[in-house]
Image (tube, grey):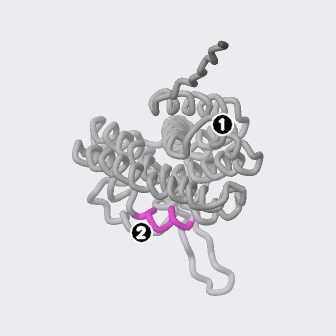
């Protein structure tokens, strides 16, 4: 009597599936020309802003209609493009120095996440992935980590560009009361806060799926609602508490919003 042999396929653990998914996303990110284009833009923006504003700063412009004279604003310190200290009066102002700063990188990260995710649904990669390789929770965690890492690199590129731009423009590098410790804590807090935005951008992307324009619109809208929170959470004179709050907030939001993204993928069509 012929004995049939039972074939068993070993199940892969969550850790192995997630590790494989993260490697795939990291490889895709580092082989995507768009990532390097955006990284270059992040590096160039502060150089252009600091050099150009230093050239036109202090020039009086007269309005031909009203005759009123207005003085062109300029950055007087390199670290203004990173942000003011927690006690600065212009914390909530809407002038150029308050808007043209490193916090713009959160929006750039949003555009990258939206394009990166929508390409999965537009090409059919996501549907094939969920069918034969990974679970939706693996996908959400991996995409959140990828978006966070890309956003952190954009922030670091902007920081390097700020140093170069300040040097080219001949601006002061005086940190005042913030000191080197405050600057380091500020950058760490901004990087950890990126996890909150990456998770929000991801949930908007899975809602819109292959409609890139819609995911970018929703992400930018949500980012604008939270934009004024960034300088309050990450001032130039940040301390350990700012870093801890941003880290805790990043983990909690990434986990909570990740559950929502997972639920959306389970309840909606993948095309």
Q: Is residue 248 left or right of residue 10?
A: left
| Residue 153 coordinates in the image, percent (x, y) | 52, 36
Q: Which residues are magenta?
A: 221-228
For marks 2 and 1 on the same chain, the one whose residue lies earlier in the sequence: 2
Question: Which residue is situated farthest in the front direction here?
Answer: 1
Quadrant including the N terminus:
top right
Q: Secondary structure at mark 1?
A: helix
In the image, 228 versus 236, the foreground residue is 228
Q: Residue at x 51, y 28 (%)?
A: 11
Q: Residue at x 72, y 42 (%)?
A: 125
Using the rendered image of the protein, determine whether residue 26 is visible from the camera's viewpoint: yes
What is the spatial separation of the Cα atoms under label 2 and label 1, in whole angstroms?
51 Å
Crowd class of label 1 (few under 14; some 14 to 19; many from 20; radius 10 Å): few
- Location of the C terminus (image quadrant): bottom right
89 inside magenta stretch: no
Compared across the picture, whether 263 is left or right of 172 comes to right
Q: Position of residue 91 (x, y in %)?
A: 36, 63
User: For residue 93, which numbered disc appears in the image?
Assistant: 2
Please state the horizontal and vertical placement of residue 100, each as a whole percent of the image: 53, 56
CB within 8 Å, label 2 to label 1: no
Q: Relative to residue 128, is residue 231 depicted above or below? A: below
Is residue 186 toward the left or the right of residue 82 in the image? left
In this figure, what is the number of numbered marks? 2
Label 2 CA crowd tier, 10 Å (few <14, some 14–19, many 20+): few
* Residue in front for this viewpoint, 3 or 194: 3
Residue position marked by numbered label 1 in the rendering: 132
């Amino acid at each position: 009597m012929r004995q049939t042999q039972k074939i068993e396929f070993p199940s892969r653990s969550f850790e192995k599936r997630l590790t494989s998914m993260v490697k795939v996303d990291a490889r895709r990110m580092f082989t995507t020309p768009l990532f390097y284009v955006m990284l270059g833009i992040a590096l160039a923006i502060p150089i252009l802003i600091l050099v150009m504003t230093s050239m036109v700063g202090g020039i009086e412009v007269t309005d031909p209609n009203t005759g009123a004279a207005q003085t062109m604003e300029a950055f007087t310190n390199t670290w203004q493009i990173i942000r003011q200290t927690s006690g600065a009066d212009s914390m909530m102002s809407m002038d150029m120095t308050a808007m043209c700063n490193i916090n713009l990188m959160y929006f750039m990260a949003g555009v990258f996440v939206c394009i990166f995710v929508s390409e999965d649904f537009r090409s059919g990669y996501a549907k094939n992935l969920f069918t034969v390789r990974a679970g939706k929770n693996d996908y959400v965690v991996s995409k959140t980590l990828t978006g966070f890492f890309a956003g952190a690199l954009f922030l670091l590129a902007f920081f390097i560009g700020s140093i170069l731009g300040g040097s080219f423009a001949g601006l002061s590098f005086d940190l005042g009361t913030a000191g080197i410790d405050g600057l380091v804590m500020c950058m760490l807090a901004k990087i950890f806060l990126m996890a909150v935005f990456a998770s929000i951008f991801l949930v908007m992307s899975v809602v819109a799926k292959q409609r890139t324009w819609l995911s970018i619109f929703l992400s930018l809208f949500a980012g604008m609602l939270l934009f004024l929170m960034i300088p309050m959470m990450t001032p130039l004179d940040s301390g350990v508490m700012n870093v801890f709050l941003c880290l805790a907030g990043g983990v909690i939001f990434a986990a909570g919003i990740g559950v929502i993204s997972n639920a959306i993928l389970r309840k909606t069509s993948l095309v």
